[in-house]
Amino acid sequence: MVTNDDGVEAPGLLALVRALHVEGYQIEVAGPLRDHSGSGSSIGTLDDGAAIAYEESRIEDLPDVRVIGFDAPPSFAVLAMRTGTFGAVPDLIVSGINPGHNTGRLVLNSSTVGAALTAVSTGARAIAISCGFAPTHRFDTAAAVAVAAVRWMVDHGSPRTLLNLNVPDLDLSALRGVRSTVLAPRSLMGLTLERRADAVHLRRFNNTEKLGVGTDSAAVIADYVALTALQSVTSDASADVSEAVRAIEEALVPVVAAVSPSAE
């Protein structure tokens, strides 16, 4: 299954679908009808009985590829397909190609990565793939990297494996290679907020410094494809939170005493 956060007709998604189709993969597309960038792994409304509209279509030059567009974020599309609501359940979800690198702490807010995180939380395997912003974005290079990643995932990827790939905007031959990375302290895209009388305006800028060593952001800047393995929603059993447990318990003692009925 191919999804993204920019809409099922977005050029990055179509470039990815066409590259995978050439390789002979059986593909379905499921994603939002409109742009849901920056909504993380939101699935939209949780109201009981809510009706989520959808539309089915086909890609004009690929009539064998079914497209299901939802009036909801991409994580909802992942859930709808992974629960078998629309037939066969996909075991590999590829999210992208996103215009705009998803590195560092920005992955928390990325709906491209959020859809992949949702997929692995249901037991699937997932790939999120991103390149740079227009007009210098290179969907062709990112699509070639995606095909190689899908080939590896099909042959070797275990359930709940999630690869986050960020591809420099270069010719394929100009890439210096692929590096296994960790999340950077800073994303390649920085954000500032500007308060005005009636609205807060968002401004985007490029981060090129303080990207860390061995990180995804630093790798892309150095012309490498950054491959970062991510985890979905899991408990950190190794974390020592005993002091926090005691502090919270102690803080609750007077509260509990105040609301408890007096002993007769």
Image (cartoon, rainbow, N blue to C red):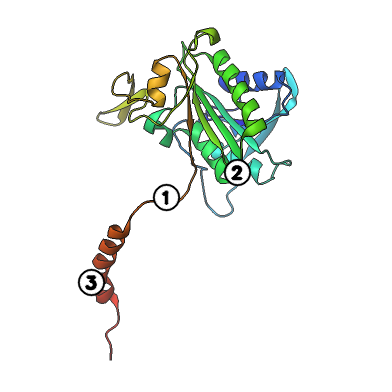
Q: Which of marks 3 and 1 is nearer the N terminus?
A: 1
Q: Which of the labelled discs sits on residue 236, or is there none?
A: 1
Question: Distance of mark 2 from mark 3, alpha carbons?
Answer: 43 Å
- Residue type marked 3: Pro
Q: Position of residue 263 (x, y in %)?
A: 28, 88
Mark 2 lies on a secondary structure that is helix
- Residue type marked 2: Leu
Snapshot quadrant of residue 151: top right
Whether residue 118 sits left or right of residue 247 in the image: it is: right
Between 196 and 263, the one nearer to me in the picture: 263
Question: Distance of mark 3 from mark 1, alpha carbons?
Answer: 30 Å
- Residue type marked 1: Asp
Q: Which residue position holds label 2?
A: 79
Mark closer to the observer (1, 2): 1
Q: Which residue position holds label 3?
A: 254
Q: Quadrant of the C terminus?
A: bottom left
Mark 3 lies on a secondary structure that is helix
Q: Position of residue 209 (x, y in %)?
A: 29, 20
Snapshot quadrant of residue 94: top right
Snapshot quadrant of residue 187: top left
Q: Position of residue 217 (x, y in %)?
A: 39, 23
Mark closer to the observer (3, 1): 1
| Residue at screen point 62% across, 31% down | 153
CB under 8 Å between discs 2 and 3: no
Q: Earlier in the sequence, mark 1 or mark 2?
A: 2
Q: Quadrant of the N terminus?
A: top right
Q: Position of residue 10 (x, y in %)?
A: 57, 22
Mark 1 lies on a secondary structure that is loop
Between 83 and 22, the one nearer to me in the picture: 22
Whether residue 203 sits left or right of residue 34 in the image: it is: left
Up/down of 234 relative to 249, above or below: above
* Residue 29 visible in the displayed image: no
